[in-house]
Each structure stands twice: as C-alpha cells, then as structure tokens.
Image (cartoon, grey):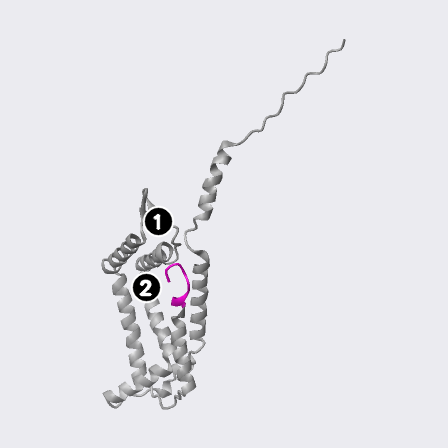
Amino acid sequence: MASSAPTPPPLLPVTNPAAAGSSPAATAVGSDAPIATPAFRLFLSKLSDSARRSLSDRRPWTELVDRSAFSRPDSLSDATSRLRRNLAYFRVNYAAVVAFALGASLLAHPFSLLVLLGLLAAWCFLYLFRGSDQPIVLFGRTFSDRETLLGLVVASFVAFFFTSVASLIISGLLVGGAIVAVHGACRMPEDLFLDDADAASGNSAAQGLLSFLGAPGSRV
C-alpha cells in the first residue's frame, strides 16, 4: 500500500510587532504639526498681497530724484511745509527708503540678522501659529501658553538689549528718517498735485500694508 504524501503544516498569520507598535506613533507624529499650516499660509498670502497693493501706489522714482526740483528752503516753516506735502505725496517711496536703510543696517551685521530672524521664527512657530491643542513639551515638562509667552518675551528682551539688534534697528531707522527729512525739506512740492482720490488711495495703502495683522490664526 503506497504511503500518502506528508501533509504540509498549517500556515499561521504572522504580525510584525515593530510595524504594529510604530503605527500609533506615526499617527501621533503626523497629527502633531508644528504650526497651524493653513493659518500660516493665509498669513503669508495676505502679507504678500498687502505689500503688492502698497507698492503699486508708489510714485515714479525719477520724480523723486528730479534734480531740478531741489532748492534750499527759505526758513524752518518753509522746510516743515515742504516736508509735510512731500510726505503726503511720496509716502510709499519714503517707506521703501526707510525699509532699505533698515535692511542694509541688518545685512551689514549677519549675526544680528540671524538673531532677529530666529526671534521671528520662534514667535511664529511657538506662539502665533501653534495650535491650541499642541502644547510645548520640553525635557518631559509641558509648558502652558502663559509660560511660553513669558519665555518669548524674556528671550526677545535679552536678544534686543544684550546684543546689537536694538542699536542696529534704531540706527537704521534714524538713517532712513534723516534721508527722508532732508529730501522732504529740500524738494520743492510746487509741481506735485495730490487730489482727494490720491489721498484716499494713500490712506488705503497704509491700511492695506497692515491688513495682514488681521489674518486668522490660532492667536492672531
């Protein structure tokens, strides 16, 4: 009598413990985004749109540097009147000049620029655009929103007043303001015409430049 073929052993389901154990962790990591991404993207979009709208209202730069329009003011009141009218007409150009002076002052000192960028990143990632359901855990300790805000304020105070960041910002603003004051006092505004529509446009541009502050987020 022929012997029957051996019966193969039954196949048992095998599970990978590492994969099974890593699934909840991966889910937890994926669910804990460092910042509220939609709010952060909306903030950047509104900031870009506000800057674009404001820069679209600038005056021609050739009109700003027209050498034939410069003369020495007769008195202090004449210089003040010129400055007031030129500020109303070249407000966007003057803001760009001050921003350029501030940027040049910071670019000349890369360490201070990195400190300032680090502070801005810390405020954005740790407080402004961090979800309320995403607490900060450091060395096994959970920090509340009040503690996080206090830590950021202290870090900003130390970075501004114990490094050269504050002095560079102040010096850049002073240099830009001095350039604007000298230009506004020496340029004759007789050929400049600012009607009501332009004034309203300038006011809307100034408001639009700060409209990104109303971007919805977790704390702004």
Per the image, the residue denoted by label 2 is 106
Q: Is residue 216 magenta?
A: yes
Q: Position of residue 127 (x, y in %)?
A: 35, 56
Q: Nearer the viewer, residue 190 or 121?
A: 121
Disc 2 + disc 1, Cβ < 8 Å: no
Q: Secondary structure at mark 1?
A: strand
The secondary structure making up most of the magenta span is loop
Question: Which stretch appears magenta?
Answer: 212-220
Can you tell which quarter of the image residue 68 is in? bottom left
Say which label, 2 or 1, has the lower sequence index. Answer: 2
Residue type pointed to by label 2: Leu
For the point 46% across and 48% down, the residue is 31
For the point 41% across and 73% down, the residue is 208
Per the image, the residue denoted by label 1 is 136
Mark nearer the viewer, 2 or 1: 1
Residue 186 in sight: no
Q: CA distance from mark 2 to mark 1?
A: 31 Å
Left or right side of 37 for 7: right
Left or right side of 27 for 199: left
Q: Nearer the viewer, residue 81 or 25?
A: 25
Q: Identify whether 77 is placed above or below 93.
A: below
Mark 1 neighbour class, 10 Å CA radius: few under 14, some 14 to 19, many 20 or more: some
Residue type pointed to by label 1: Ile
| Number of numbered discs | 2
Q: Secondary structure at mark 2?
A: helix
Q: Position of residue 133 (x, y in %)?
A: 39, 51
Q: Is residue 141 magenta?
A: no
